[in-house]
Image: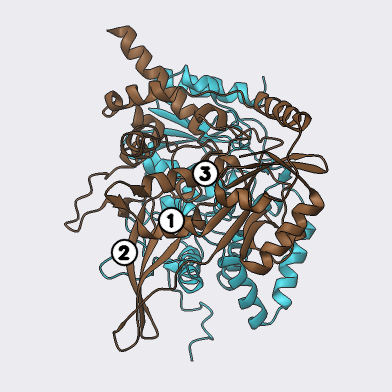
Chain colours: A brown, B cyan
Amino acid sequence: MKHRLITRKQLNELLDRLAQEVCLYAPVRDKTGTSWAEIRRADEACLDEVNTVEPAKGFVFPRCEVLLRFDPQGNPVEPEPPPQQVVFGIRPCDARGIAFLVKFYTQEGRTDPYVRARREKTTLIGVACTRTAPTCFCLGVGGSPQGSEGLDLLLVELGEELLAEPVTEKGERLVADLPPAEEKHLTAAEEQRKKVEAEISLRIDTRKLQELLPGLYDTPLWQTLALTCVNCGACTFLCPTCHCFDVTDETVRGRTVRCRVWDSCQFALYSRHASGHNPRHDPASRYRNRIMDKFYYTVEQAGMVSCVGCGRCIISCPAGIDIRQTVGTVQNSKCKLKNEK
Amino acid sequence: MDRSEKLRQRARELLEKGEVVMVIGSGPPSDSGISPVLFATTPEQAENLTASTSCAQNLANYLLKVRDRGKVAVVARGCDARSITVLLQENQLKRENLYILGIGCEGIVENGRKSVACAVCRHPNPLIYDEMIGEPAAVAEPDPEVSRADAEWEQLSPDERWERLSAELDRCIRCYACRQVCPNCYCPVCFVDASMPQLVGRTHNLSDNMVYHIIRALHMAGRCVECGACHRACPVGIDLMRFNRRVAKTVRERFGGDAGTDLSQPPALTVFKPDDPQEFIR
């Protein structure tokens, strides 16, 4: 698909039109930064922040997904189908998060109809990063500030114009009428990518981690690492790829709903059995699970590391835990073990 | 010798002599600007301790995690020491298992501004300690902006307050970071985690968010030391200190005193005195 060129004015017109036709979501300014909200006009969108406080995963995997509804007489009522929605301003790391969720939840023989239905009705318009935060490390886990994975359309800001890269048919349809981009625009975007990528120094050798982690399951290292962790769920709830849920029934004024709600492996309740036994009874085993899951389990399950390097877990951690340091410690500890042998 | 150097020296000595098994303090700040908690069990590890007061955590929280390990030294600012006092009053810690290295606190700075809890801090210096490292800090004038905002809040009608409270708490994602960082929120099973019977719904809705926050505020009445750890921990920026200040004010006005400032006085809501104000019981 051809790269196109879109002016800011044309983009605003496109967004204004989309807002009339479907639910249009974008980052909007709030007191803590920017958050996802439905917008009616293009100028409500705010791309000033490096990223939103909360990730965009809720568009395909909402915090509360109604699975079943019953009326007061106990008759089942079909839940409403998900709405047609367009998400504008999603960053490449968050789009990769959605790509992961879709991949994880739409596998051969175990496809989740809810995630699939939502993704089918969603159009993702990404905007490439023009700057980074000190906590960004998408490059370290295989992403890029201009990555298009998971998106329908990627926009790269080049002053008053934007380079539009359609990724899917859906994205192509949005920009089909626009003029093709010229070589100079592609070069400018490439230069911008190099400039932004240069700001991100960290690399994580995810393949090496994948080899190391199974052998590290029983090391006392986790006890040491987990000491700082307070076992809240901030990192998992703000993670673009964390995908665990619980199913709960609630009755409000005679109407019962069965919902799928986000859950967190960092909570003791998450793994507690009905018998009272808890296989992850201590904070260290829950801390270990998060790292194992991100860099080992999901690679086995879905063929993809489930960390996109957005840095939200670092920003949100009340204890100041930095996943990059954790990974570094884990990698080095094994090296020591090897040398000792 | 600067304060950090003195702290490191004392920490090394305590560990070398085997007087304590661990020193809990603050390490160098990470990229998010927060200084993670440092657990030094060897003199070498103590080299990374800093006496900076930029650690967003209330260090008393970690004493509960290691309370079965033997005697532990902890670096304590005014609020950390007040939490320790509450934990001692509630028999959660043993005084003889603690060695308190007191430091005067200049306040925690977040994103270039003094944390809102520290902006109106009345007790920057520890009231219990085994030794002070460096000079005590001066009690700063309370930030007039915070006092003004509180006064404005008081002027609102109950309906307006409820509306603002609802708007604030509607954003809660129930990650329970506020609960987890609070040293005085230590129930083995929190009421929100009870499942037989389930007391609080698990979906994201205002009603359950309210139940969580209001019950927590009441549980903390007379026990909250206003350290602001919960406020700083909140990933979505809920103004928890507004509620904490309000609850603390009520306790102060009705029962006198600030939580954790007097080891000999049990927390206000754990005792009954015949002269307690009780005009609301008719």
Identified at 28% across, 65% down, the residue is B195
Q: Is the residue under label 1 in contact with that under label 3 (CB below 8 Å)?
A: no
Question: What amino acid is labelled 3 in the image?
Answer: Gly
For the N terminus of chain B, the image quarter is: top right
| Same chain? Circles 2 and 3 | no
Depth check, front residue: A286 or B115: A286
Q: Is residue A277 above or below residue A311?
A: below
Identified at 33% across, 26% down, the residue is A213
Question: What amino acid is labelled 2 in the image?
Answer: Ala
In x, y percent, where is residue B73? 45, 32
Q: How far apart in space, not on screen, are marks 1 and 2 (Cα)?
A: 15 Å
Task: Kindly give the residue lying farthest to the left in the view shown.
Answer: A275
Residue underneath mark 1: B185
Q: Which mark is residue B36?
A: none
Q: Which mark is residue A150?
A: 3
Task: Please give left or right for residue B37 compared with residue B190 in the image.
Answer: right
Question: Circle 1 marks a residue in which chain?
Answer: B
Task: Please give left or right for residue A208 compared with residue A158 in the image.
Answer: left
Q: Is residue A116 above or below residue B50?
A: below
Res A283 → quadrant: top left
Q: Which mark is residue B194?
A: 2
Task: Please give left or right for residue B16 compared with residue A193 in the image.
Answer: left
Q: How far apart in space, not on screen, are marks 3 and 1 (Cα)?
A: 41 Å
